[in-house]
Image (cartoon, rainbow, N blue to C red):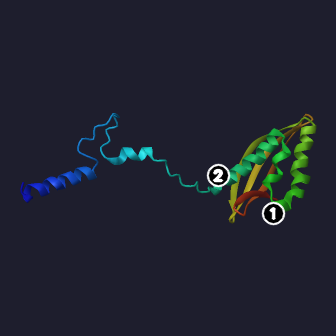
Amino acid sequence: MKLGTILPAMLLGLLLAACGGGNNASTSNTGDSGGAGNTAKEPAKEEPAKPDPAKDRQAVADKILKAYTDLDSSGVLALFKAEEHEKAKSRMVREIDDIKKKAGTVKVESSKIEEREGKFYLVATLIFDVAGENSSKTRESQLILHEGKWYLSFER
């Protein structure tokens, strides 16, 4: 054979090898031609979830509202920085426990997170039914970011 016929044949062979061969017949019916089918076999490289401040603030708000509606004060302190635990005990924990002792109920009428001057506040209107008396109270707590975690706060 002459160099003129060998060279094109070698180039064609190299191209076919680089593209995964000439006859991409396989037992699967994916219609995929090329190496794309091989990527499914490799473990997916998941990037760590990026924090979503709005979702994280809402999660804290949901937890305190759930504590009220379930009359379960056990998780309330974890929603506050350690410096505010005493205030949280004397206000929220005591209130929830008192309502529970009196066989009362609490329902959330409305709640929202408002941003004012770069600060975030949970504003919730709660309906208390204790000893047959209904009352509606609007409560406001600041949401603060401390060391990468959102907390409730009595600060203003």
Q: Is residue 46 left or right of residue 154?
A: left
Q: Categorize mark 1 by other alpha carbons within 10 Å: few (<14), some (14-19), many (20+).
A: few
Q: Position of residue 60 (x, y in %)?
A: 73, 51
Q: Residue at x 73, y 45 (%)?
A: 110
Quarter in which the N terminus is drawn: bottom left
Q: Residue at x 73, y 46 (%)?
A: 62
Tell me whether the residue at label 2 lies in contact with that at label 1, contact meaning CB atoms closer than 8 angstroms.
Answer: no
Q: Position of residue 83 (x, y in %)?
A: 85, 62
Residue farthest to the bottom, as pictured: 117
In front of the other: 155 or 63:
63
Q: Residue at x 29, y 48 (%)?
A: 20
Amino acid at pointer 2: Lys
Amino acid at pointer 1: Glu
In front of the other: 117 or 47:
47
Disc 1: which residue: 155
Q: Is residue 121 left or right of residue 37?
A: right
Q: Residue at x 80, y 56 (%)?
A: 80
In which quarter of the view is residue 127 placed? top right
Q: At numbered mark 1, what does the secondary structure look like: helix, strand or loop?
A: loop
Disc 2: which residue: 55
In which quarter of the view is residue 107 placed? top right
Q: Categorize mark 2 by other alpha carbons within 10 Å: few (<14), some (14-19), many (20+).
A: few
Quarter in which the C terminus is drawn: bottom right
Q: Position of residue 14 (x, y in %)?
A: 22, 54
